[in-house]
Image: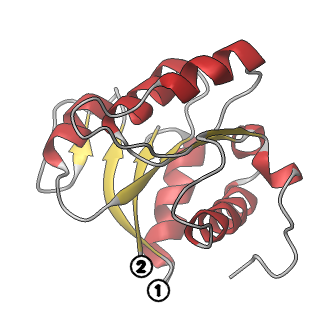
Amino acid sequence: MVYVGIVGALTSRGQNLVQIIKKSTGVCKLLFTVDSEYQANDIGKGEYRTVDEAAAVQFGPSFVVIDVMEEGYKERAKLYRFYGIPAIVGGAEISEQEITTLEKGYNTRCRTFAPVIIEPSLITEAAQTAFNAIRKILKWIYTQPVKFEKQVYYNLLSKINLSGATS
């Protein structure tokens, strides 16, 4: 079971992903949602206005953040690295220099490293297609050896072998 947090939960793509994840059986479980449009944090529902607030409260099982917000994704990717949270981020263009900067970031308190995958297709594909891409990426993450070769990946779907990676 993979516990998931969705950033951009009130966007149309985010709402579709939330519904798909809630209906999925044995693959993912929704842990929390984040959107700046929430009126207030609701810990009981797992709804937060910012990633910082969600990360401060969610100290339970390990989780992966799926971020489908186009605006500000580079800054949020830095937060995920700082908190040591594995994340799949929908984003557009990112330069080699920005990737290098992200790779230098890590959780300063625990000195842990977590991969951040910036995948442009998450913001350009339909929700079901994006969910299938997320499943493929999650399978890739969880079948890798403990030590990753890199820590920041860009446009990973085009680089990994996708055959048999749909479950």
Disc ID at residue 61: none
Residue displayed at 67% across by 61% down: 137
Is residue 134 toward the left or the right of residue 24 in the image? right
Residue 1 visible from this viewpoint: yes
Across and down, in percent, residue 107 comes to 32, 34
Mark 2 → mark 1, Cα distance in angstroms: 6 Å
Question: From the viewer's perspective, is the residue at label 2 or at label 1 nearer?
Answer: 2
Q: Which residue is mark 1?
A: 26
Q: Is residue 112 above or below residue 71?
A: below
* Mark 1 residue element: loop
Q: Are marks 2 and 1 in contact (CB under 8 Å)?
A: yes
User: Can you say which quadrant of the picture contains the C terminus?
Assistant: bottom right
* Frontmost residue, 31 versus 127: 31
Residue displayed at 18% across by 61% down: 60
Residue displayed at 66% across by 24% down: 99
Residue 50 visible from this viewpoint: no
Q: Which residue is mark 2?
A: 1
Is residue 61 toward the left or the right of residue 128 in the image? left
Q: Of marks 2 and 1, which one's residue comes earlier in the chain?
A: 2
Across and down, in percent, residue 72 comes to 53, 18
User: Can you say which quadrant of the picture contains the N terminus?
Assistant: bottom left
Q: Amino acid at mark 1?
A: Gly
Q: Amino acid at mark 2?
A: Met
* Mark 2 residue element: loop
Residue displayed at 54% across by 68% down: 20
Q: Is residue 53 above or below residue 141?
A: above
* Frontmost residue, 115 versus 11: 115
